[in-house]
Amino acid sequence: MRQKIVVGNWKMNKTYEEAVSFMQDFKLFVRDINNVEMVIAPPYTLLNYLKNEVNGTNIKVAAQDVFYEEKGAFTGEISPKMVKDFAEYVIIGHSERKKYFGETNQIINKKIKAALQTGLKVIFCLGESFEERNQGNTKTVVETQLREGLANITIVEMGSVVIAYEPIWAIGTGNTATPEQAEEIHIFLRQLVKDLYNEETSLNIRIIYGGSVNPNNATNILKMPNIDGCLPGGSSLDPGSLTHIIKSFS
Ligand code: PGA
């Protein structure tokens, strides 16, 4: 049985005070939930606060990105080892990193490798653009992203990887994929993991969906058998909405 997981990606949102106010409510709302792994990915500036704040709760912390070098003259960057002080998870390969910061599948692969070698768990994002889907290339695109992103990742390391299927056209647009569209790609990705690794790895790996998940559509998305959770962005900024999504698993 794959444990369900919901990862709230705050992106570049929330000051310290806003985070404090969020956590006051959120901790109360989810205090009895223990059937879903709950993860919050705040900006780096709030990792230390979050780490202390979730102490003694079921809530876990993720960073939104990481660099692949261990240390040195890389102004503005943060190493896996630094993240490890505060977070259990790290999101890698988000489409906004590709769009605004030029991340390639090769860079993503180096980041995934470095993070896993440091003992972080990785939420590896991939997904096609609107044009790619319209041209019928969705599966080719996600297959390339998966193969290149996971190059040289061992079967043991795969135990610490969560795959997040996030169609770019669904992120922040309100146009969520239908449960059937998402399920089709999740099945395809699981089969690829089976081909690249083995059946056990493919059955154990969690594949979550991201892209305009909200309290209204979460139930239908999360009831699909190959969708093991979700990665809400906008809807994770409000403690009530995020709680509603977490409670959508039936
Ligand atoms: P969204 O973001 O829920 O605001 O569409 C999802 C994501 O980018 O992870």
Image (cartoon, rainbow, N blue to C red):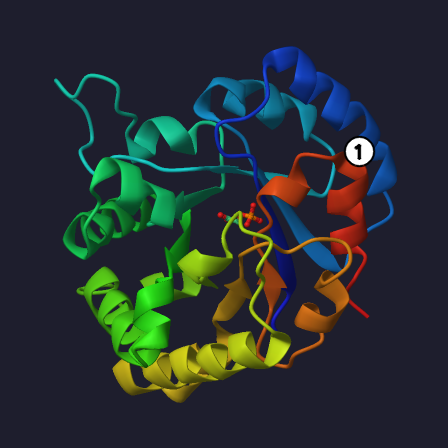
* Label 1 crowd bin: few (<14), some (14–19), many (20+), radius 10 Å: some
- Taking the image as shown, residue 17 lies to the left or right of residue 34, namely left
Quarter of image, res 74: top left
Q: Percent x, y for residue 49?
A: 59, 18
Q: Is residue 2 above or below residue 246?
A: below
Q: Is residue 28 above or below residue 160?
A: above
| Residue 100 shows in the view | yes
Residue 145 position within the rendered picture, expressed as x and y whole percent measured from the top left: 26, 65
Quarter holding the C terminus is bottom right
Visible residue check, residue 1: no
Q: What residue is rendered at 53% in x and 78% in y?
A: 181
Q: Residue at x 20, y 31 (%)?
A: 70
Q: Would you name the residue on which mark 1 appears?
A: 27
Relative depth, front residue between 2 and 249: 249
Say what amino acid the circle numbered 1 marks.
Lys
Quarter of the view holding residue 156: bottom left
Q: Residue at x 29, y 77 (%)?
A: 135
Q: Is residue 249 above or below residue 58?
A: below
Quick one: SS at disc 1? helix
